[in-house]
Image (spheres, rainbow, N blue to C red):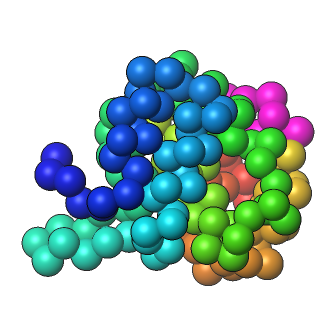
Amino acid sequence: MPTVFQSGNDELKTLLGDPTTSTLRAYFDARVSEWSAPTKDMGVFTVGIFYDLAQSITGSDAFKLLDAAAVWTLNEMTEAQSMRYVDLLADLAQSSNTTEMPTNLKKHWKSIIDSAKMTDADSVALESLRSHYRDVG
């Protein structure tokens, strides 16, 4: 895939070699610093802000990163970051290839959903995340 975003590419390479909470956060912060919209229109196609991560990580690594990201709190984020946080969670959930919810996501689910509704209630990512885990509440 061609480079779509300027920020976050180096951090993605680091993340793929060392999938940890800190490398995920560095990637997230770098990407959101450049682009606060959920998608980028490339003329012929549209990509999500974390598309490159979603295409590069699968299974257990995505599951572990989803568990790690679930403990981030929205009150520690800028508005732009909090708006894109659910996009990241939704992409990691899809990439995990399971509907089993990681421990931390299960623990913080209600708080994440309630906070996301307040910041980005119409988010496609929020509905995608809820649908992935069959949450209709």
Question: Quarter of the image containing the C terminus?
Answer: bottom right
Please give the name of the residue rendered at 47% of the width and 31% of the height, measured from the top-left corner: 15
Residue 89, image x, y percentages: 60, 49
Left or right position of 122 against 117: left
Residue 131 visible in the snapshot? no
Residue 102 part of the magenta-drawn span? yes
Residue 59, image x, y percentages: 48, 23
Please give the name of the residue rendered at 70% of the width and 71% of the height, measured from the top-left corner: 78
Left or right position of 125 against 104: left
Image quadrant assignment for residue 39:
bottom left
Q: Is residue 125 or residue 54 the one in the foreground? A: 54
Q: In the rendered view, would you say 61 is above or below 67?
A: above
Left or right position of 19 against 57: right
Residue 98, image x, y percentages: 56, 29
Residue 66 visible in the snapshot? yes
Q: Is residue 67 or residue 11 the one in the foreground? A: 11
Which range of residues does the magenta coloring cover?
A: 100-107
